Amino acid sequence: MNTDILISNITNPTLLFFLLGVIAAIVKSDLEIPSGSVKFISLYLLFSIGFKGGQELAHSGLTKEVFITLLLALCLAALVPLYSFFILKQRLNVYDAGAVAAAYGSVSAVTFVAASAFLEAEQIHYGGHMVAAMALMEAPAIIIGVMMIRKFDIQQTERQRLRYIVHDALTNGSVLMIMGSLIIGIVADTKQAEGIKPFTSDIFKGFLAVFLLEMGMVAAKRFKAFRSYGWFVTLFGILLPPLNGTLTVFITSFFEMETGNRFLLAILAASASYIAVPAAMRLAAPKADPGLYIPMALGVTFPFNITIGIPLYWWLITQF
């Protein structure tokens, strides 16, 4: 692996703010970002990447590569939670296995944003349709996870909620914001869109740094409670991302795709959701322990991906 890329990623200011958040939690500092501000920043990040992606998609149109990318994204969103569930079911109950599988089949928008920032720093182009790919991967993974819970659980009460689960997955705030922003970006007039460019682009990395500071504090706090589950789930959270990322790199090598798009698809396959899935699982699988699947995604997989995963998947892309 190129050590320059690894060092560049580790010394990225946004990542350093994440580490600062981890340190703040470990030393029990009173550093705190108001919850209202955190919610605003998270919505801003989704709005920004959705709108910019829509603008780029409007310029590129529906090409063969766009179609293939979106199809691969949907297939990965269904495949990853499927085999994840059967691995997890060996050591976890059906509810927890289904919830964790859904989280790992779904995606992390913040990881995607960090990967996008990496590509921009390296001056590598990627298509706006990758935002659409990210949005499309949320709901299928949740639905597959719920279906696995229902298939292996005989309680009738769990069989009556599929309509509500699909609705909740599609109307979840994060999914709705990014999809809505994507559509607005597609239909918006290009000249008019230039008027909000300072808001959608210029301040983006600053907001991302503050958000990752908060994520660092949350990840460190939740990881402590998560340790009681033992080494199996920790190893799963560390080993599954590179497995999914490598699998995606291998699959995309058979198609004519830009390197930036291949990289982002690998990142999406390797990431895990800690926003959309927990919201959906409160309704779909109330017996699943959020003290397991949220820290796995946020406290284990997220730090792995933004420190080691991003340079690892990029190195793999350059080799294959």
Image (tube, rainbow, N blue to C red):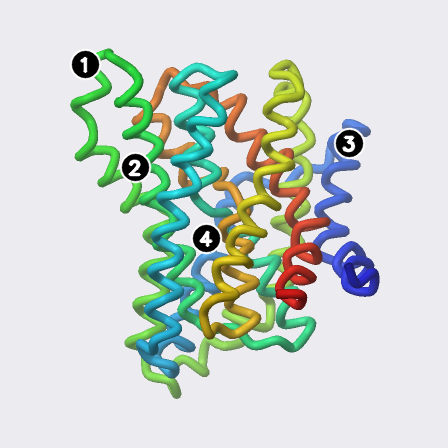
The local crowd at label 1, few if under 14, some if 14 to 19, many if 20 or more residues have their Cα within 10 Å, is: few
- Mark closer to the observer (4, 1): 1
Whether residue 52 is visible:
no
Left or right? Give the position of 188 relative to 96: left
Task: Name the quarter where the C terminus is drawn.
Answer: bottom right
- Rounded to the nearest angstrom, the CA distance separating label 3 from label 1 is 47 Å
Residue 240's x, y, as percent? 57, 38
Give the residue pinned by disc 1.
156
Point 20% across, 27% down: residue: 161
Q: Nearer the viewer, residue 249 or 177?
A: 249
Q: Residue 228: x, y in percent?
A: 64, 14
Name of the residue lying farthest toward the front:
254
- Report, in whole angstroms, how far the alpha carbon at label 4 lies from the one at label 1: 37 Å
Q: Does the residue at mark 2 contact the one at mark 1 (Cβ under 8 Å)?
A: no
Query: Which-is-in-front pick, marks 3 and 1?
Result: 1
Label 4: how many Cα within 10 Å (few below 14, some 14–19, many 20+): some
Q: Amino acid at mark 2?
A: Ile
Q: Which mark is drawn over residue 273? A: none
First along the sequence among labels 2 and 1: 2
For marks 2 and 4, give the CA distance: 24 Å
Looking at marks 3 and 4 on the same chain, the residue that comes earlier in the sequence is marked by 3
Dot 2 corresponds to which residue?
143
The residue singled out by tag 4 in the image is: 43
x 20%, y 31%: residue: 162
Q: Work out whether mark 3 precedes mark 2 in sequence or the reverse, and give the earlier one.
A: 3
- Between marks 2 and 4 in the image, the one whose residue lies nearer the viewer: 2
